[in-house]
Each structure stands twice: as structure tokens, then as C-alpha cells.
Amino acid sequence: MTSTDTITAISTPVGEGGIGIIRISGPTALNAAFSIFSPVEKFVFPEPRQFYIGHFKNLSSKIIDKGFLVFFKGPASYTGEDIVELHCHGSMLVLKKILYEVIKSGARLAMPGEFTKRAFLNGKMDLVQAEAVIDVIRAGTENALSAASARLEGRLSKKIDSIKEVLADTLARMELEFDFSEDDTEADKTDFTEPLEIASAGLKKLLLTYEEGVVLKDGLRTLILGRPNAGKSSLLNVLLQQERAIVTDIPGTTRDFIEEAANIRGILIRLIDTAGLRETNDQIESMGVDFAVRKINAAGLVIYVFDATSQISIEEDKKLLEMVHGKKLLVAVNKNDLVSDSERAAIKKAFNGHKLVFISALNETGIDNLKNAIFEQAVGRTFSSSEIADTGGGAADELLSSLRHKEAAQSALKSLENALTALLQKTPLEFIAIDLRRALNSLGEITGEVTTEEILDRIFSSFCVGK
Ligand SMILES: Nc1nc2c(ncn2[C@@H]2O[C@H](COP(=O)(O)OP(=O)(O)OP(=O)(O)O)[C@@H](O)[C@H]2O)c(=O)[nH]1
Ligand SMILES: [Mg+2]
């Protein structure tokens, strides 16, 4: 699959830095590099994985910068092809000048993700691992990083491969059976049922990890809603541990919205503080209220802040809660420092059926419980204290975190379930084999054995240039 053209790109981020790296990959990578690099100490051919110091010079031998050349001989390289890295100072001007010379000598500018795409096409990694590269780069929390690097190491691929193996083995035995068995001997179908049940249980377990996988990878948009003065901005400030929003005792303090990211129990939570919900003649405030309502749809979680001292108007809050019907929802009963036990009991009764957490944003009590509840709502399982709070480290080994993987796993599961029903109904093995091939095909889509150019383009176009 080795490509015939040579690609190049600046692989370090845009901006100033200590060093900058230009990557060249393809059959003429060395030629392209030597059109600009002239070593300080002469050598015949660069040893792979050695640093050589030299000057980067343009065609008229004018020195652009001084730096290093490193050669990776294919297939022992990231892309599986010959790669040269040119390390210079991290100046955009220097990098662009070197890149320009490399392109003049016949390399072409790489497309986003093209190095990784080549790594995939050359069998250096499967598609799950290739996708994990960008997840590692973009990981914003420890948990996101450990899940992404587990995928990059091939843990998810191994899981999928082990299921594929069971299916391929069963399929092979089935094919033998319908090739060689006498027409009138009924095959012992229980031999086939058990491995298919094991495979489908494995897939079901994997599918259950999707919710957590996605939240760990992408974070969760969390809308803080409630009536004016309930303490929404106070809560935002406590969760951020910074005085981000203005807090006053005047209802209608927050009129615009405030969005900030917080790391809560290892999950990236994008908090959005909003204008308190009420009918108002103030044009700006009313726009803020409209905004809050519109944002409900896009939110993954809503924290509804209820002022514990405003029980008289509790029916109004319950009406507002209807707007968030069908969403993941937590009711944070705030100002817990101001109410009695009997009042708390009454509130519990009134909000029966909702997940309640009593807090005081002012005294910062109940906040740990609220964080646990946020984690629970976000990933669908309880937060255990063995997971190091706010730094992560508790992410499961194999997590599904991409819709593409989930849909393929679902369709594999469906084919398996069809096969299992067909076995029960004593359908001829030839037909059951079709379902098994379908399931294998779906799983092959995940790891990239079965794929189309369109899928690859979609995946790699979300990458950065130079990766
Ligand atoms: N006693 C007590 N007061 C609180 C608590 N939380 C907030 N407050 C007070 O309640 C008032 C309103 O707090 P904010 O955080 O501004 O409330 P908000 O919901 O953002 O209000 P708007 O932006 O106007 O919708 C302020 O005077 C806070 O100090 C709490 O837990 N206990
Ligand atoms: Mg506010």
C-alpha cells in the first residue's frame, strides 16, 4: 500500500516555540530533506534514528537556520514509509521557509491526518488506534487521556478482535458442517449457540460503556437553571473555585450567560450559568431567559437550582422543571443552611421522583455530594472513592467512545441475535452463516478491515495537518 508521493507538513503547533518540526514521509523523503539540509560533519547516508546537526539553506545557499535531521527508515517509522524530521527553531517564519524549500524539491503539502492515514493504510495501526491518536492529542482530562491512550495501545481493538475470533471460528465450523454433513443428520446446534452467546454478551457489555466513553472524551454541557436569586452563579463559582460570576442579592443579576469548563471527578464539565427564569420587562434579561430555555436542548445535563427558602412558590419551580423533561437532571436544593429539618422533608416530598442534592453554595457544604451526583448522571455509574477525585485514573480499560464504533457494534449484535434466534428455529446453517458473516463485517468496520474511502476521509479530515 506504500504511497508513491511524498508528503510534508509542519508538525508542531502554530506559534512561537523552542523547537519546530517539519515532517516528510514518502519514497523521496531523504532527497527532499537533503535539498535543504547540509550537515556540519559530512556523512554518506544517515543512520536511522540518529540526530545529525546541520544548516538549513535555501537554493542559493543562504542559511535559514541551524538544526537537526532525523531519519526513520520505513517500515520502522510512524507511517511505515521513509520519514525525515527536520528540527529547527520554533519560528513560523523559519518553519515556513524550510517547508517551502521541501515542497519545491517535490514533496507535496500533507492533508489533515494524512501521516496517520498512511500509518493505517500501511498496517502500522488499525482504525481504532488511528482514531485514538487525535483523542490523545485533544484529551482535556486525565480520564480522557487514559481512555484514549488505552485505545491507542490497542486495548479496544484486542477486545473486538477476540469477539471476531470467536465468530470466525464458529463460522468455519459451520461451513465444515454444511459442506460435509449428510443431509439427514441434524447437526448439534448447541455447539454453535454457546460461542455466539459469549460473543453477544461481550458486545452488550462493550455497548454499555458508550455513555461513559463519550462523556470522558467530549465532556458534558451542563446548564445551570433556576429562578432568580436561587444561587446559580454562586454554585458556578463554587464548582469553578473562582469568583467568575457576579453574585448579588438582587434577583436578575445574571442577564447574559457565562460558560466555563470545570474538571469534576475527572470529567470535563462545561458549565453554563444562565439568567434566572422569570417573566420580565427588562429587554436584556428577557433575552437571557430566552437563551437559557433554548439551551436546554443542547445540554447533556441540567442542574436545576432551587432556593430552599422559597417553598411558597415551589409549584412554579415544578412547572419550570417540566421544560427539562427527558433530560438528565439534578435538582440542587440550595441555601440548605437556612432551612430546618422539617422544611427539608417537605422539599423532598414536593420534588418526589427527582434526584435531589442539598447544598449551600454560600458555605460550600454538600458540594462533594453534588460532584458525585454529577459524575453519576454523566457516566451512568456511581463514583467510587478509589477513583482519585478530580484527577481521574479510574477510567475503564475498553470504552466505546465514537458513534461510528457504537453503530457498528450495534449492527453486529443485531446480526448475532438473528443468528441465535435462527439456531433456535433450526434454520439451515447456510442461512445462519450469512448472519455471522454480517456480524464479522460490522466488527471489521470498527477496526478498519472493512472500510471505504469515504469513511477514511471523514475520520482523518478532523485531524490536524502534520499528524
Ligand atoms: N444563605 C445562603 N445564601 C446564598 C446561598 N447561595 C447563594 N446565596 C445568596 O443568594 C443571593 C443570590 O445568589 P446568586 O448566586 O447571585 O443567585 P443567581 O441564581 O445567580 O441569581 P440571578 O443571577 O439573579 O438569577 C446572593 O446574595 C447569595 O449570596 C446559600 O447557599 N446560602
Ligand atoms: Mg446569577
Image (cartoon, helix red, strand yellow):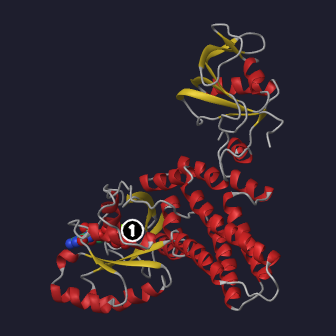
**In the image, the residue with mark 1 has its CB under 8 Å from the nearest atom of ligand 1:** no
Which residue is at a point 35% across and 70% down the rendered structure image? 232
- Image location (x, y in percent) of residue 460: 70, 51
The relative height of residue 331 versus residue 399 in the rendered view (above or below) is below
Which residue is at a point 54% across and 30% down the rendered structure image? 16
Which residue is at a point 62% across and 76% down the rendered structure image? 196
> Badge 1, how many Cα within 10 Å: few under 14, some, many 20+?
many
Quadrant of ligand 1 in image = bottom left
**Amino acid type indicated by mark 1:** Phe
Q: Inspect this view and state whether residue 252 appears.
A: no
Drawn side of residue 166 relative to residue 348, left or right: right
Q: Quadrant of residue 346?
A: bottom left
Q: Which quarter of the rendered picture does the N terminus lie within? A: top right
Drawn side of residue 59 relative to residue 320, left or right: right
The relative height of residue 199 versus residue 8 in the rendered view (above or below) is below
Q: Quadrant of residue 389?
A: bottom left
- Image location (x, y in percent) of residue 396: 45, 62
Element assignment for label 1: helix
Drawn side of residue 118 relative to residue 16, left or right: right
User: 92 or 435, which lies in front?
Assistant: 435
- Image location (x, y in percent) of residue 60: 77, 10
- Image location (x, y in percent) of residue 173: 71, 72
Q: Which residue is mark 1?
A: 375
The relative height of residue 240 versus residue 56 in the rendered view (above or below) is below
Q: Inspect this view and state whether residue 280 appears.
A: yes
Q: How many marks?
A: 1
Which residue is at a point 67% across and 62% down the rendered structure image? 446
User: 400 or 73, which lies in front?
Assistant: 73
User: 290 or 236, which lies in front?
Assistant: 236
Q: Which quarter of the rendered picture does the C terminus lie within? A: top right
